[in-house]
Amino acid sequence: MTHSARLVITPVRGFRQLSAFIRLPRRIYAGMTGYAPPLDMEQRSLLDPSRSPFFRHGEAQYFLAWKDGRLVGRISAQVDRLVRTVSVATELTPETGFFGALDVASPDVVAPLVDAAACWLRERGMTTMLGPWTLNSNGEYGLMIEGQQAMPMVMMPWHPTFIGPAVEAAGLEKRMDVLSYQMEMGPEAEAAHIVPNGLKVGEGRLGTLSVRRLDAKNLDRDGEILRTLYNDTWRDTWGFVPYTEDDMHSMIHEIKPILREEHFVLVEQNGEPAGVALVVPNVCDVAGDLGGAPSPLGWMRLGKRLLRHEFQSARVILLGVSKALAGTALGAMLPALLIKELMNRGNELPYRRIELGWVLETNQPMRRLIERIVPEPTKRHRVYSRTL
């Protein structure tokens, strides 16, 4: 336990304090333009050690900040054993620890929370602290720097503008920015121009390629294809942490009630997986006005909206291309083919916008591709680091 004036930082213990930790953001950010509270049950799946697959390969400690007996902030500190398996290109080492879930009511709360997380990580032999990641780079990622008033999106963290400067004042330095782009969907937003004219899957030069959708009868198999290609594509990328089988199984079955076959794009070459993308409907569209813990009437409304699939937007959460195609013309073209296929499905899906997120600022090939459709990013999230 640490003290600073009237500020007290305490570790989270037990179900009730974890519930307070989960509810805190919607209490301190209520009424702020652009903020939409996620559902408590969604956050519990992410954070509860008894439910989150993260705890099969990592450990974490949550902290709460109190001022005059009132909750004013939170942070997590975590160690992920998966970083021992990644390549040097990720710039992660076994001594890299992480922080996340940083939410505060005022700037003065940031430094004591960061210090509490740093102390916990230092005690476990970590020499560098990186974040915010909740709980790793496959969860909620980065501190929002720009885009606070943009359309809220599922699994995208939201922060008021004052937190970034407070984090830097607490001794953390920028390590990487990740960018998000919102693209218009539907016939009027045809994406043919991102692929050279005359090229179509299954025809001509692309005759060896075929496209299929999600096979609901073989959900776990398609999830494993998605996991394998995603890990294969990004394994040498900054900050990469692999999806485990448990991670993917949990994620797929968590979103199963809102998944449709159109949300999954698999490009195969001669029957072998070559590229894949997964889109998830934006739960903020149907739950954002109900609060994190809807009333019984609110749950009825949510159920009706889900049954009617009343989503207006969606997010590409995973996109991967087989490493076997790296350095080939087809490998360079596949991301464009995947994005084009997703946008063409605007004729079938009800979404007006689709968000491509967490593009590393250093990933110039992907940025050039996306910025042919959307010239400027809609949101910017920042990852910070500090030597312990």
Image (cartoon, rainbow, N blue to C red):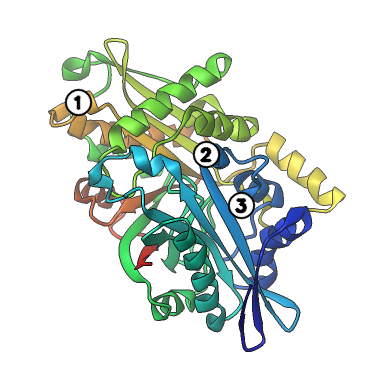
Find numbered disc 3 in the image and state the secondary structure of the residue it sits on: helix
Q: Residue at x 49, y 71 (%)?
A: 114
* Residue 326 location (% of width, % of height): 18, 30
- Taking the image as shown, residue 73 lies to the left or right of residue 173, namely right
Question: Measured along the vertical axis of the image, is residue 319 above or below residue 17?
Answer: above
**Res 198 seen here:** no
**Res 181 seen here:** yes
The residue to which callout 1 is attached is 325
The residue to which callout 3 is attached is 284
Which of the image's four quarters has the C terminus?
bottom left
Question: Measured along the vertical axis of the image, is residue 168 above or below residue 319?
Answer: below
Q: How many residues crowd around disc 2 within 10 Å: few (fewer than 14), some, or many (20 or more)?
A: many
Question: Measured along the vertical axis of the image, is residue 212 above or below residue 259?
Answer: above
- Taking the image as shown, residue 276 lies to the left or right of residue 44, namely left
* Residue 112 location (% of width, % of height): 54, 77
Disc 1 marks which amino acid?
A: Leu
Q: Residue at x 53, y 81 (%)?
A: 107
